[in-house]
Image (cartoon, grey):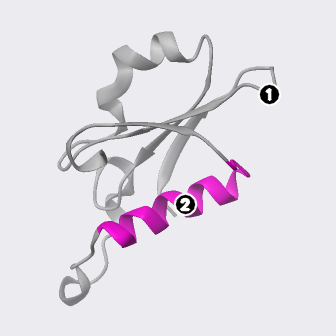
Amino acid sequence: MLHYKTYELDDPEAPWVVFVHGAGGSSSIWFLQIKEFIRYFNVLLVDLRGHGRSKGMLPHKDERHYDFEDITRDIIEVLDSLNIRKAHFIGISLGT
């Protein structure tokens, strides 16, 4: 599973915002934005496969071709594991 970090409010009804970085980046690029968002939202930061702390998720050399469907499934796996049923998404580059 992807590496992720959550910031959760005490309010169980607070909406979720998921930040998705671009190619070559990691969730650490959002450090300025999350300072404000965590005041009002539950926040989920993910490191896409092969990036940041998810670098170990890259398959063997001959299986390194993955597409947007694979990336989407990776993110949905995290959402499902956290029981997040709906969220707003903020992305940049590949993350959009």
Q: Amino acid at mark 2?
A: Ile
Instruction: For label 1, count other residues whose C-alpha is less than 10 Å away and answer few (under 14), some (14-19) or many (20+).
Output: few
Above or below, 91 against 51 in this view is above
Q: CA distance from mark 2 to mark 1?
A: 20 Å
What amino acid type should be assigned to the residue bearing mark 1?
Answer: Glu
Q: From the viewer's perspective, tell me whether residue 88 is left or right of residue 67.
A: right
Residue 57 can be seen in this image: no
Image coordinates of residue 62 in percent, x first then y, are: 19, 89
Is residue 70 highlighted in magenta?
yes
Q: Report which residue position mark 1 lands on.
A: 13
Q: Tag count in the figure?
A: 2
Q: Residue 33 at what x, y percent from top left?
A: 39, 17
Q: Which residues are magenta?
A: 68-85
Q: Secondary structure at mark 1?
A: loop
Question: In which quadrant of the rendered view does residue 86 lie?
Answer: top right
Q: Which mark is residue 76?
A: 2
